[in-house]
Amino acid sequence: MTKKLLLGAVLGALVAGTGCHRSTRENAEDKAEKAGDKVEDAADDAKDKAEDTVEKAGDKIEDATDK
């Protein structure tokens, strides 16, 4: 009887451990995806700012040559 209880407890722990591992892995994947999205957003913002800076510099050069 105790062997069956012990076996049941071990199998239950293994099943619970597998479920927790899957949840942890999925959570890690979600965090990695969110981090990748943040990096992509930051790169897009930096690109937009660089384009604005180049455009403003071009406008200043154009204004200076018009005079």
Image: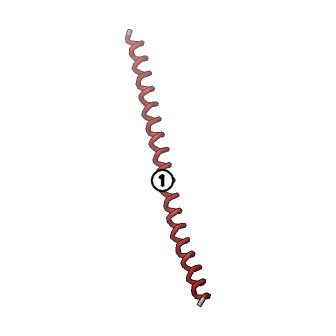
Residue 46: horizontal and vertical position, in percent?
47, 35
From what the image shows, is residue 29 above or below residue 37? below
**Which residue does the image show at 44% across and 21% down from the upper left?**
57
Reading the image, the residue beneath label 1 is 33
Q: Residues within 10 Å of mark 1 (few under 14, many from 20)?
A: few
Residue 16: horizontal and vertical position, in percent?
53, 72
Looking at this view, is 55 or 8 the one in front? Answer: 8
Looking at this view, is 62 or 21 the one in front? Answer: 21
Q: How many marks?
A: 1
**Which residue does the image show at 47% across and 50% down from the upper left?**
34
Residue 17: horizontal and vertical position, in percent?
55, 71
**Please, what is the three-letter code of the amino acid marked with disc 1?**
Glu
From what the image shows, is residue 48 above or below residue 27? above
Looking at this view, is 27 or 49 the one in front? Answer: 27
Residue 24 horizontal side relative to residue 62, left or right: right
From what the image shows, is residue 16 above or below residue 45? below
Residue 6 horizontal side relative to residue 26, left or right: right
